[in-house]
Amino acid sequence: MNQISTNADAYFAAVMAEFEAFTPKKAQDVSRRGFFKLSAAAGAGLVIAFAVNPKVAEAATAAKEFVPNSFVRVAPDGVITIICKGPEIGQGIKTAFPLIVAEELDAAWSDVKVEQALIMPDIYGRQSAGGSTSIPANWDQLRKAGGVARAMLVSAAAKQWGVKESELTAQDSAVIHAATGRKLKYGELAMKAAALPVPDPATVPFKTRDQYRLLGKSYTGVENLEVVTGKPLFGIDVKLPGMLYAAYEKCPATGGKVASANLDYIKTLPGVKDAFIIEGNGVVSEVMPGVAIVADSTWAAFRAKAALQIKWDESNASKDSWTKSVTKAHEIAGKRGDTVIYSKGDVEGTFKGAAKTVEAFYSYPFVPHATLEPQNTTAWLKTDSKGDSLEMWIPSQTSDRAKTQVAKILGLKESQCTLHQTRAGGGFGRRLVNDPACEAAAIAQRVPNTPIKLTWTREDDMRHDFYRVGGFHNLRGALDAKGKLVGWSNHFITFTTDGKNPVTGGNFPNEEFPLPLLAASETTQTMLPLMTPCGAWRAPRSNGIAFAVQSFINELAVAAGRDHIEFFLEILGEPRHLPPQTIATLNTGRAADVVKLAAEKAGWGKTMPKGRGLGFGFHFSHAGHVAEIAEVSVDANNKITVHKLTVAADIGPIINMSGAINQCQGAAVDGVSTMMNLMVNIENGRVLEGNFTEYPILRMKDAPQVDVHFIQSNNLPTGLGEPALPPAMPAIANAVFAASGRRLRSMPLRQAGLTT
Amino acid sequence: MATVTINGTVHDLSQIDPSTPLLWVLRDNLDLVGAKYGCGIAQCGACTVHLNGQAIRACSTPIGSIAGQTVTTIEGLAKDGKLHPLQQAWIDNDVAQCGYCQAGQIMTAAALLERKPKPTDAEIDDAMTGNLCRCGTYVRIRKAIHDAADKGGAA
């Protein structure tokens, strides 16, 4: 019997470390002409990516295409195929990645077709999406892929015309000799370019920002036609000849095992082909114990699943209780935490000498990701006298990791596994974990030579997640006689599974705003025990911290009798990039700029009718500086209407303006949804909520108008899947206070009787 | 014989258990996967199709209850090779993020425009309230419906 581990923290630590390793640390000035320099970690991936995937090269030779590297193919008919290496999960990289390649290639966007790469980390390097790192981590590699291809096409034209390369320019999929007015389309040059040696990528310069023709404009998503006509795009849409459909039931309390199940009865049900217990490897991020049902349709599998009677052995299962945790947190909030995790200056002395002090307790609950496409994977284990092979179709954010995991589980080499990354119906961090893929592989192993599609029910999805961990902050602030913030203290109460470290998403960053900006500040921490697996939920840590910290800043401004934004800008102080000046550290100048822009666009300071107010929130996370202002009204029946959110963001240059605005609008709506309504209760180790009746995601009638503004600074372009979410929550809470005088310190607001 | 007309084709479904929801017949038996599974209890609208022109939730509609009737799915919305104005408006406004809910959104909106060719914001909100978008694309959905309506969207 395997040891059961409900702790996914080590898995997440490895995922995060990988994101960290592949993301550039240093600030870049993208207005300048640059050559290609890589960190050691990214370099290994890149060099290989320029060695063309042998399978692709073979196909290209057959099709008579020019294939300078594993990202670009140019056919003689002029069609330019750009390969998207990473997964599309709704964040827009299947459009943004090819745009970056096309920009440096000087391709006409209308000539471009986009293909999804197979999972081949040995060729492409990292092929995952998370931490809003896709753009900064791949920016150089993708630009270089396009630039090398362009250089070779230019070189081919120079040879054909017998002119110097320096006399030539490229534009709209063509090389132009301005002196003679001659022009050759890329298609016409393709086979000549194919005969040339691939130049050292380091010798090909990047375009400067003022030379961009494609980036920064608006593009509709490359798969939008397929989306609106209902074509099979998603993992759940996969259909293969002879495919069977699987469902999988696990213990509702994490860590339980199957003692017995009514398998004989289940096997008699209509459409059921087989039912069996899977012991699993006991790893919560891979395969936990459960009962698998294989049937001739999804409906037959689901219906049989509902008829399962399983006796669970819960001797080592979770007994977690949210209500008990809340009670405990209230009990200990006013004390100092067990450990000091940040300390600067004389905190107690500062509080003793303060003109005024403020104390408040904030909390937020557990939330699931609730991607609209439930977890699923199709797996096909082919056994053959020549050797086994596994083929899988996975809607995952980390299919590259899945390859390693499923190979291990089935005892195969990675070279025996072919993984297709499908479009994913939402990610939000849920699909960083490949438990559904591992389960599908384990089921396929029991039904070899038959494609098996495992689909989770909505209830499975909501009750077997890696949750955003709940948290508590007992905050204290000290103001001097002028109403300036001079001291800060936070007793942060979080959770631990291993007894040593906070769970994933439950750690408090040392240098979190405003700690390093004050002369006296501290964070102490207490950890409560937990078995429920936690993970990365859109803007991990920040999605809770921003609510507590930025709401409390507003409380302090009110206590000081000062305007919130003026008070906030004073805390930021002079424009400077905090040490060690990486893309992960706050730049107070960029912060102040977005705050001022949001204030201007939202009409901060304007007179509001009774019952209506503006609230402000700022947060820096995932390399993005974002300020938001909410306009909210609260009526006599405590009905809240969020009329508008104004978003101002600096993430450097924008790749696809339409996609960028969409991400901000979506994050703002997600913020309203989470702020107003969303939580799950955990009792006796079980997540009680199972479907949207109990987990009421925001509906259209309650969605605000969202106005989005960007400052396109000359910094490295960074990601936008996450950083626009955290400021929305405090902006709403602060607007509720401005509108009604009610200070709400616990998410979601519906707990306090407020409704949308 | 239990037949259902789906996108203009008559299908004999007498071999399928009549309690089976239309959604799974479409997806697993007929390879029409545009209608999506999101909740299974008519709460999210991702499975929305038209039954005799009305928007319904395919996940909660047993096929035994619709014998002899007419179903249109997202795959049957475009006519004569031309996209429905809503489909075009969805592309023009770049509505989708993950895209999973969008076929259901479009089917609900198409039924709305048949009833109300020029809906107000309030009428749109009211009609679309059964369709969840986890990515939060509501602002663009509303705009796309107005755009399609302005171009004579009840195609």
Image (cartoon, coloured by chain):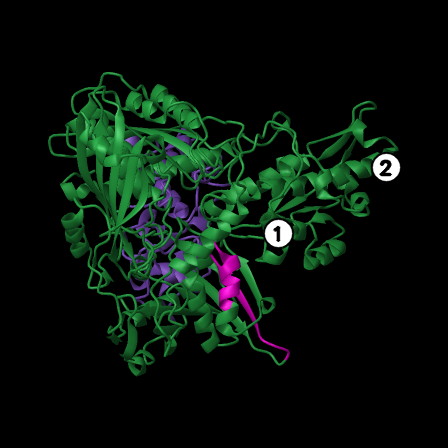
Chain colours: A green, B purple
Q: Mark 2 vs mark 1: which is more N-terminal?
A: 1
> For the residue labelled by badge 2, is the local secondary structure a helix, a strand or a loop?
helix
* Quadrant of the image occupied by residue A520: top left
Q: Do residues under tags 2 and 1 come within 8 Å of each other at their CB atoms? A: no
* Residue located at (80% from left, 37% from top): A155
On-image quarter of the C terminus of chain A: top left
Label 1 marks which chain's residue?
A
Residue type (three-letter) at the residue carrying disc 2: Lys
Task: Give above or below for A581 relative to B18.
Answer: above
- How many marks are shown on the rendered structure? 2
Q: Which residue, given by chain and number where applicable, does mark 1 sit on? A: A45
- The label nearer to you, 2 versus 1, is 1
Q: Which residue, given by chain and number where applicable, does mark 2 sit on? A: A159
Viewer-proximal residue among A111 and A36: A36
Q: Is residue A393 magenta?
A: yes
Residue type (three-letter) at the residue carrying disc 1: Gly
User: Does A743 sit left or right of A193 as displayed?
Assistant: left
Task: Give above or below for B61 relative to A548.
Answer: below
On-image quarter of the N terminus of chain A: bottom left
**Disc 2 to disc 1, how far (Cα)?**
32 Å
Viewer-proximal residue among A281 and A305: A281
Q: Position of residue A306 (x, y in %)?
A: 27, 69
Residue stretch in magenta: A386-406
